[in-house]
Amino acid sequence: MSHNYSSTSNTTLPIPSTTTMDCYDVDPPRKNGESWKVDNCTNSTCINGEVTTKSASCAEATEPICVNGHKAVKIYEDNGCCFKYECDCVCSVLEGSNYMTFDGKSYTFNESCSYYLVKEIINKYNLTIIVNNNDKALTVIYKSTTVHVNGKRIFPAYSNSVLQLTNTLKAMTLEIPEIDTTVVYRTSSFKIDIPSSLFGGNTEGQCGGKLPGLCRPVASPRHTLCHPHNSTPNNPHNSTPNNPSASFNNWPNNHDHPNITHNSTHNLSASFNNPMHTCHLYNEKYQAGSGTANRTQEGCYCPEGTTLFNTVYDTCVPSCGCVGPDGKPKQPNDTWTVECKECVCDMDSLSVECKSIECPAIQSPNCSETGQQLVRKTENCCPTESCECNVTLCPPPMTCPLGLILNETEGTCCKSYSCVPEGVCIYNMTKFKECYCGPEMDPVTKLNIATCTPVVCETNCSEGYEYETAIDKCCGQCVQKRCIFTTPDNTTRVIDVGETFVSPDDKCVKYTCENINGDLVTKETKTTCPAYNPLDCEPGTETTDADGCCKSCKVRSVCEVQKKETVIEVNGCKGTVNLTSCAGHCGSSSIYSAEANEMMHQCECCQEENTSYQQMELTCADGSKALHAYIMVETCRCKKADCVPGTQRRRRR
């Protein structure tokens, strides 16, 4: 639509023609030549102190009569000033079987299956509406969005970046602002309203194809006759929207007369408020996300000063919020534990959601220690198992035979008992004793008294030896069981037979304990490594064998040509080329000369022998090309070079 502006001038105080003046009579003051927008339909300009206004000239918009019986809607242009009328596509289904299509035609359909109500012929907005006649379910698909968030049911009101969902216990309304689409659902009846500007001529399904010619020019007033429907009793708790096209309790009766439209509506004298408040942020989300928040839906409303607790329970409460087990309110996202359940005040529905505490899997402990028993308890709502001591399960002390004494050891729960040798000799169930004739005399027998003490055997052996008893002797002896040797750092080592020890100071030396004819011998083995000179190695190739003894590496290559891909940049122009270079090992020496009485040095370097000039193409930042000449190495060889003097030491005299 073209915009023509007519000019009207508001004269201000005269200003000398020789001087350009700003406009100070407007708020805020404007500079000469400055233009600004007064409203959607008016622009103003300051010209030499005078304010000139221009109003947009809009083409006359004629309101048509829509053949589907619904009122045409205004469609504003981007400037927000000029508009035109269009007939929206409205499809109604009553009681699940009575259909009224987009073009106002009605029919009855009772098949039991799922059918497309609205489907785009050419998919532009990803909108599909499906009805299931079996369970009277309505499915709206838009950008893969469903009214479930993270697998959790959401009670209306609910909104996100794509849709807004509200309800009043009688009717549920789904709005998709991006495509100006509204779906109202109540039990088995529903209404679908889509804009013809977006979907005209591009739909198919039970609601019919949306044809462009749904409108006719406005007829004379005599053709606007409507027959009012009987009003329902005025009920302060039951209201109907004050919008002829929003109610579909009764089927609109369109007769064959082409210029007469009949709309059945309920018009109540009671005042209408905004859609009812609920304790789950119904009104806040509705007002924040809907541009038609002043619209009233059919439904039941709580008395003034109270709020519907939620859409599940028909209870009006004076204040909102979750109620905890102690009867006190809980804020959204508050969590608590009660009766072995974790509860949360859900942010979306402002209702308490509880789930049983998930307990970790129980791993039974090993209660095999003497005196232990398995105890099962419940802690923090979860079963636990633990080992606890029961002293009644502990064994009593044991009685040791002759020559052995009782040994006690503290255990986890009980003392453990064992009989250990007393260190005496037993023969014919009698302890052997060592006796000697003492100087004291028995006053009765007049004989010297014999003094006896039990024979105590020395059983403590040095490291590497173990005590062994002898059949024909009172006491046994210490027998060598392990090899004992001393390393070069004067450290004594003990190893078992067949075991090998590697010195941490010299990993080329191994010590092995061997049994040769009953004698334990320590065998020393030294590893001889091949010649190794780190100066002859390619850098980074040095390695050590698994024993950590010998080192090896990849010997440096001889002097030869090597290639490397290189990026050359000259004056901002770049190009990639394989540059050649010389690298490798060349001979050098440092030998004492008796004749000269000094060190004689000979040095060689790996250098280019033959070279050539080559040209390459460089690409510049502006896309242009440039030629560049560079030197390419053809062959390399070792050449004599001056040796760099090293640090000289004074000779001793």
Image (tube, grey):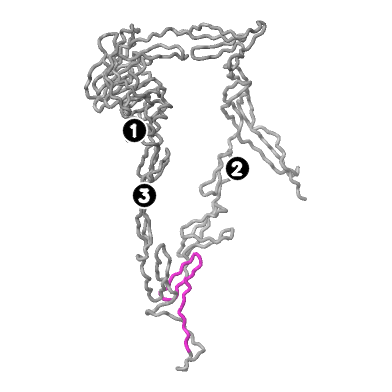
- The amino acid on which the numbered mark 1 sits, given as a three-letter code, is Thr
Q: Quadrant of residue 319?
A: top left
> Where is residue 649 drawn, in percent x and y?
74, 45
The answer to whether residue 578 is visible is yes
Secondary structure beneath dot 3 equals: loop
Q: Which residues are magenta?
A: 449-477
Residue at position x 42%, y 7% in the image: 60
> Where is residue 263 drawn, in percent x and y?
29, 16
Circle 3 sits on which residue? 381
For label 1, count other residues whose C-alpha is less than 10 Å away and answer few (under 14), some (14-19) or many (20+): some
> Where is residue 113 drawn, in percent x and y?
24, 24
- The amino acid on which the numbered mark 2 sits, given as a three-letter code, is Pro
Circle 2 sits on which residue? 534
Circle 1 sits on which residue? 311
Q: CA distance from mark 3 to mark 1?
A: 33 Å
Residue at position x 37%, y 46% in the image: 338
